[in-house]
Each structure stands twice: as structure tokens, then as C-alpha cells.
Image: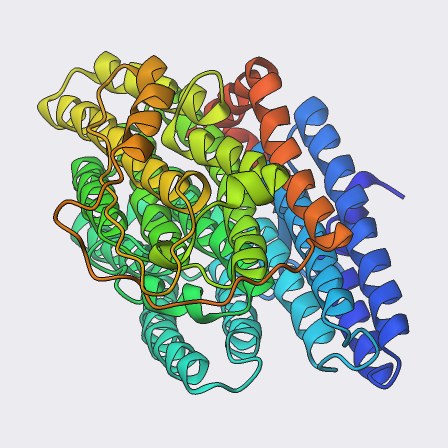
């Protein structure tokens, strides 16, 4: 058995697990055991594939020994293997968090039977997207994600979740229609939808047709990745979902769209004239997203807008189309998956302890739950790009790549990246100060809270926060926030451990940033030169 034969396992194992958990729907403990075992096995396979692709190059497998044009190829290279490994880890840990939440709420013996099979289908869809070797299989992956996402978004059946799920489905169906139309156009122009073969045939067709197809694909994947102005659906959808669902969505689903942009941009359209368009979209995504985050009164919506904003950093590196830019973008994708997942999980813990995620209804959490305060502080500073965290390393890599490019749009993005980073620091510092440092508001008490004026001197952040706390005074009083009963529920060990595991993983990326950047440099070189990918796929065709 060769390593290539492991390629279907990250897809087949979750699908098999979904079938088994559906059969065991009346036995919740069996569902838990099956789900954990399946996802742990998928994580082990992902680690094996990452090791193999790093040392031996891309690997491919034609399923069922069918060759083109009927065959379906699964392909793994350094980029897809890295994404597969991190996504497998996140999916497993978030499931542990969800199980811990069920145990703590006393419903471990009667969960929604559909949750586990649907979650495993989501895992299969994410893995299939990273391994897909043709556009139609990638389309199938998105449809798997659409089905699973709608079910998970609407768990509980509340009106808010149904509305959010409906919006998500409508947007996803529009993008699916556009994707299917683009696939039809690609097949009509080239006679194939296999990515390796397309990389050879697309340069031979009319440049105008090729440009139109590229624009269609960029639009489709831009919707999936929540690129401005196609991002309005995300802040209304993710915050309304259950915490484990919003965490895995925030960490992974938009990154599947970004991955599709990277894969198609450099494999199918290496001489694209749209690099500046991608960079411009990245700049707008950064700025508009972070301005929305600053204005939000709730932690979940604030995190949803920062999620949109930081997609812009990834587009920055993709648009540069240089080895250093693509490498930094890949590094930033890996960093952002872990940090964003951690922050959404921690927001669930905040809601559990404080009774709300609305900032004006929180306070005093640093004194009552210092562990939670530390868990929030680390990924928040990481998201803002404070050294020595991985967010700082990734942003420095992007800034260096931008200055090396030297174009006006690149320098504009360098400035926009710095501004976005400072505004991200302001947004998370405001949340930290209000939720953790200031005393909790009580009914009938006027309270004034002013945020510090942040300066580029990161070393003065603690002084600024301390001054903000001291500045609470009765002058110019604001209306008191609605009274909220303090919810002194302890943090369940499984939930706390799962959130801590993701935070620890993000710290691991910071600690091993050098080796990881070496890996992403190699992945970027592999992306910019498609020869190895094409040889791996076409040499594996069945006779």
C-alpha cells in the first residue's frame, strides 16, 4: 500500500462515520466514540500526507482506476497537506468542545441525533475541497459544506438562526449557480475540468475567454471567502450559530474559499492580469472589515468583522504573486485558522461565565476567572499582530513582500495593513478592557467608560488600559446597561481544555515560526511552478 492510497481516507472516514453515527442515533455515547475515533484517524492520515508531500513531492490518486475525462483525481501537495492537517486538528478539538458543552448542560444523554453525522459530513467536505484535483469535485465539496452548514446553523430552530441560515443558503446557492456556470464554460472551452490538464490547455484558448472564466471563478471563491463587497452575509450568519458551529465556520469555511483562490490563480492563470484587482479587493476587505469590527457592541459580531478584515491580508500576499508574498499568505492562513477558532471558542466561555457577549453587559471577568482572561488575551494579541506571536511574523512577511514589490498598490497595502493591525488592536483592547478589567455594571448604576487613545507604542498598552480603567467617573453619564444576572457557572473542563488546546497550537505556530516559514516558502515555490503538480497527476492516470 502506497501513501497515495491514503488520499481518500480524510473524506471516506468521516462519511463512513456519519453513516455509523446516524445508525447509532439513539446511542449518544456511541456517536461520541465514533466521531472522536474517525476524526483522530483523519488527523493521523493528514500528518502522514504532510510528511510525505514535504519529502517526496505531490502525490495523486485516480479513484477507481478511471482516467480522464471520466476519472476523479485526488491530489495532495505541500499547501493542501498543511491545510488538511490544521483543519483536521481544529475540527477534532471543536468537537471535543461541543461534547463538553453538552455534558455541562446535562444533555449528553439526549443530544440532537443529527449533529454528529452532519458535523462529520462537514469534515468530509472540507477535506475533499483541499484534495480535489478537478473543478467539479471542488464544486461537490462546496455543496457538501452548504448542506452541512445549513443544518448546523439552524440547530435549535430559533427564529434568529433560521433567518441567518436562510441568508447563508441563498448566498451559497447563488455562488453555486455561478460556479456551475463557470465549470460549464471551462469544459466548453477546454474539454476538461481536471486542474492539471487545465493548466496546460487554458493558455491555448482565447485570452478574452480565459479572462472571463477567471473572473467568474474569482467571484465564486470571493463569495465563499467573504471578500468585500461580497462579505455582507457573514457577520449576520456566524454569530447566531451555536458556539462550536460558529468557531469551526470562522476557522475553516472562509479559508476553503481562500484556498480555492490560491489553487486556481496560480495553477490555472499564472500569467493573470488581475493581480492588482486582487490586491485592491484585499485592501478594501481589510479596511471595511475592521471599521465594522470597531463599531460592534458584541464580541461575536466584532470577531466576525475581524474575520472578514483579515481575509484581506491573505489576498495581499496572493495578489503580489511573488514567492515571498505567497509564502506569507500561506503562513497567515495557517495562523488565522487557529487564532480565529480560539477566539470564537473563548467567546462561548465568556458567554457561559458572564451571561452575555454584549460588551456593555460584561465586566470584572479578570478577577473572577483569570484563566479565561489569559486565554482571551493571548489569541487577541496574536490577532492584532503583537510580537512575538505568529500574527506579527505573518504580517511582517507580508510587509516585506509588499516593499519588495515596490508598486504603488503594494505600498498602499503596506500602509493599509499597518492601519488595520492598529485598529484590530483597538477593537480587541476595547473588548478586553470592558469585559475583563472594568467592574461589572449593576442595575441602576451609571457608568462611564472611555477607551484609551492607542499609540504605535505597543509597550504602553498596559498603561493605557490602566488609565482607561481609572478614567471611569460619573461625569457625562451614559445610560446604564440593561441589568444582567451574573451567571456564576464554572467553566467545564472539556470546553476549557479544548479552547486551551487551540490557543496552545497557535502558540506552537509562534514558537516554530521559522520552520513553518521554511515549509511555506517551499509550498509557495511549488505553487508558482506547477510542473511537479502536473507530473504527479498526469503520470498517475490509469492506462
Q: Which residue lies at the image location 55% right of the left edge and 39% below the top edge?
A: 367
- From the viewer's side, name the closer residue of 64 and 417: 417
Is residue 491 visible from the viewing direction of this image? yes
Q: Which residue lies at the image location 38% right of the left edge and 37% below the top edge?
A: 266
Left or right position of 131 against 330: right
Residue 258 percent across, percent down from the top left: 41, 47
Q: Please say if 123 is above or below 335.
A: below
- From the viewer's side, name the closer residue of 421 and 450: 450
Residue 243 percent across, percent down from the top left: 55, 62
Left or right position of 505 against 26: left
Q: Please say if 22 is above or below 1.
A: below
- From the viewer's side, name the closer residue of 210 and 278: 278
Residue 534 percent across, percent down from the top left: 54, 38
Residue 473 percent across, percent down from the top left: 23, 41
Residue 391, located in which quarter of the rendered image?
top left
Q: In which quadrant of the rendered image does the N terminus lie?
A: top right
The chosen color scheme is rainbow
Q: Which residue lies at the image location 18% right of the left edge and 30% below the top edge?
A: 416
- From the viewer's side, name the closer residue of 200 and 340: 340
Is residue 270 visible from the viewing direction of this image? no
Number of labels in the image equals 0
Q: Which residue lies at the image location 81% right of the left edge and 68% below the top edge?
A: 17
Q: Please say if 368 is above or below 66.
A: above
Residue 327, located in which quarter of the rendered image?
top left
Which residue is situated farthest in the left direction here? 408
Left or right position of 528 against 30: left
Left or right position of 290 against 440: left
Amino acid at each position: 500500500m502506497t501513501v497515495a492510497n491514503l488520499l481518500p481516507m480524510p473524506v471516506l472516514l468521516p462519511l463512513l462515520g456519519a453513516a455509523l453515527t446516524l445508525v447509532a442515533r439513539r446511542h449518544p455515547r456511541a456517536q461520541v466514540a465514533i466521531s472522536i475515533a474517525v476524526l483522530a484517524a483523519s488527523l493521523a492520515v493528514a500528518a502522514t500526507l504532510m510528511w510525505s508531500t514535504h519529502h517526496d513531492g505531490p502525490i495523486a490518486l485516480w479513484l477507481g482506476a478511471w482516467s480522464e475525462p471520466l476519472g476523479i483525481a485526488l491530489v495532495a501537495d505541500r499547501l493542501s497537506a498543511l491545510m488538511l492537517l490544521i483543519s483536521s486538528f481544529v475540527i477534532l478539538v471543536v468537537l471535543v468542545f461541543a461534547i463538553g458543552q453538552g455534558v455541562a448542560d446535562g444533555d449528553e444523554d439526549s443530544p440532537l441525533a443529527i449533529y454528529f453525522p452532519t458535523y462529520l459530513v462537514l469534515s468530509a467536505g472540507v477535506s475533499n475541497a483541499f484534495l480535489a484535483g478537478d473543478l467539479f469535485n471542488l464544486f461537490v465539496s462546496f455543496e457538501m459544506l452548504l448542506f452541512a452548514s445549513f443544518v448546523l446553523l439552524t440547530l435549535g430552530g430559533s427564529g434568529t438562526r433560521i433567518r441567518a441560515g436562510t441568508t447563508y443558503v441563498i448566498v451559497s446557492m447563488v455562488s453555486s449557480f455561478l460556479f456551475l456556470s463557470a465549470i460549464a464554460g471551462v469544459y466548453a472551452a477546454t474539454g476538461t475540468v481536471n486542474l492539471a490538464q487545465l493548466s496546460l490547455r487554458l493558455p491555448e484558448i482565447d485570452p478574452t475567454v480565459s479572462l472571463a472564466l477567471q473572473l467568474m471563478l474569482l467571484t465564486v471563491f470571493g463569495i465563499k471567502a467573504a471578500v468585500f463587497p461580497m462579505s455582507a452575509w457573514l457577520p449576520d450568519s456566524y454569530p447566531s450559530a451555536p458556539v462550536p458551529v460558529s468557531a469551526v465556520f470562522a476557522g475553516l469555511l472562509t479559508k476553503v474559499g481562500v484556498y480555492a483562490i490560491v489553487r486556481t490563480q496560480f495553477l490555472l492563470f499564472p500569467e493573470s492580469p488581475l493581480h492588482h484587482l486582487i490586491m485592491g479587493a484585499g485592501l478594501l476587505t481589510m479596511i471595511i472589515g475592521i471599521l465594522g469590527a470597531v463599531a460592534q457592541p458584541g464580541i461575536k459580531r466584532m470577531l466576525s468583522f475581524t474575520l472578514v478584515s483579515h481575509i484581506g491580508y491573505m489576498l495581499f500576499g496572493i495578489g503580489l504573486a511573488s514567492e515571498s508574498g505567497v509564502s506569507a499568505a500561506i503562513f497567515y492562513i495557517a495562523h488565522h485558522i487557529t487564532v480565529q477558532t480560539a477566539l470564537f471558542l473563548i467567546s462561548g466561555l465568556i458567554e457561559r461565565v458572564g451571561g452575555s457577549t454584549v460588551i456593555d453587559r460584561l465586566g470584572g471577568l479578570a478577577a473572577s476567572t483569570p484563566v479565561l482572561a489569559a486565554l482571551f488575551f493571548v489569541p487577541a494579541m496574536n490577532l492584532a499582530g503583537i510580537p512575538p506571536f505568529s500574527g506579527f511574523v505573518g504580517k511582517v512577511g507580508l510587509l516585506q513582500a509588499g516593499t519588495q514589490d515596490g508598486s504603488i498598490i503594494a505600498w498602499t497595502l503596506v500602509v493599509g495593513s499597518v492601519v488595520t493591525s492598529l485598529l484590530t488592536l483597538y477593537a480587541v483592547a476595547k473588548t478586553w478592557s470592558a469585559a475583563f478589567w472594568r467592574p461589572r455594571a449593576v442595575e441602576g448604576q451609571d457608568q462611564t467608560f472611555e477607551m484609551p487613545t492607542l499609540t504605535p507604542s505597543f509597550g504602553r498598552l498596559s498603561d493605557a488600559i490602566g488609565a482607561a480603567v481609572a478614567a471611569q467617573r460619573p461625569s457625562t453619564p451614559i445610560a446604564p446597561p440593561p441589568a444582567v444576572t451574573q451567571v456564576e457557572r464554572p467553566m467545564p473542563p472539556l470546553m476549557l481544555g479544548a479552547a486551551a488546546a487551540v490557543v496552545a497550537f497557535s502558540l506552537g505556530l509562534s514558537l516554530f515560526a521559522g520552520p513553518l516559514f521554511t515549509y511555506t516558502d517551499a509550498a509557495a515555490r511549488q505553487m508558482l511552478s506547477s510542473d511537479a503538480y502536473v507530473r504527479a497527476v498526469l503520470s498517475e492516470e490509469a492506462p
